[in-house]
Image: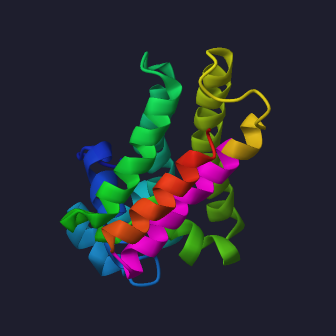
Amino acid sequence: MARPRKFDRQLVLDKAMDVFWSQGYSGTSMADLTTAMGLSKSSLYDSFGSKHEVFLTTMDHYRRNVTARIRSIADLKAPPKQIIASVVGRSVDRILAPSGKRGCFLNNCASEVAPTDAEAAQRCAVGFAVMEDTFCHLIERGQKQGDIPVAKNARALARFLTGTINGIMVIGKASPDRGHLNDIAETALSALD
């Protein structure tokens, strides 16, 4: 009879995600994962399967625990334009923070793995869609409140803002210049006028 697993699944997924986030998929070995997760190789394989399965599970974990928080901003009572400006501004602050150099986990997955991995690409698309839908909801609410022109295509604008934030996260890793990144953010926000 197999022994029951005795570890905190959330905690070990956080640790695995941290390794993939810092080192990328290709740069992460099974030894890196077992060390970080505090699991033996057999426990890791029994619980999660292959490195690829651990990776996909961390992407799902990220979506449930990080991306889900993005959705919650749509319900904030502040003016939608102000919420959007805060999200875009925080993306600049986040990539420039000492801990921000890793960028966005989902963005990193999309850049490194998604072009050759349909399962990872699908998970990235779902995550980006959450952000896009959140922006779309905020823009439509702003249009109803008269803060954002109704002539603007809410869905197209939401896609543009999603692309802008992801672009800031990529550019900021290579060129962490606050002035340049603020130019991108301010120009993007002017599309709401």
Q: Would residue 97 be found to the left or right of residue 170 on screen?
A: left
- 15 up-or-down from 179: above or below: above
How many marks the image carries: the answer is 0
Residue 105 at least partly seen = yes
Question: Quadrant where the C terminus lies?
Answer: top right
Q: Quadrant of residue 16?
A: bottom left
The picture places residue 145, in percent across and down from the top left corner, at: 61, 15
Identify the residue shown where x is 70% and y is 29%: 149
Q: Would residue 167 be found to the left or right of residue 14 on screen?
A: right
- 77 up-or-down from 61: above or below: above
Q: Would residue 77 be found to the left or right of residue 135 on screen?
A: left
Identify the residue shown where x is 28% and y is 77%: 32
The picture places residue 148, in percent across and down from the top left corner, at: 64, 29
Q: Is residue 1 magenta?
A: no
The picture places residue 75, in percent across and down from the top left corner, at: 48, 19
Q: Main secondary structure of the magenta part?
A: helix
**Towards the viewer: 75 or 61:** 75
Q: Quadrant of residue 76?
A: top left
The picture places residue 127, in percent across and down from the top left corner, at: 58, 48
Q: Is residue 166 magenta?
A: yes
Residue 49 at least partly seen = no
- 64 up-or-down from 14: above or below: above
Display coloring? rainbow
**Towards the viewer: 159 or 107:** 159
Q: Would residue 30 be found to the left or right of residue 159 on screen?
A: left
Residue interval drawn in magenta: 158-176
Identify the residue shown where x is 40% and y is 81%: 174
- 175 up-or-down from 51: above or below: below
Identify the residue shown where x is 42% and y is 20%: 78
**Towards the viewer: 185 or 60:** 185
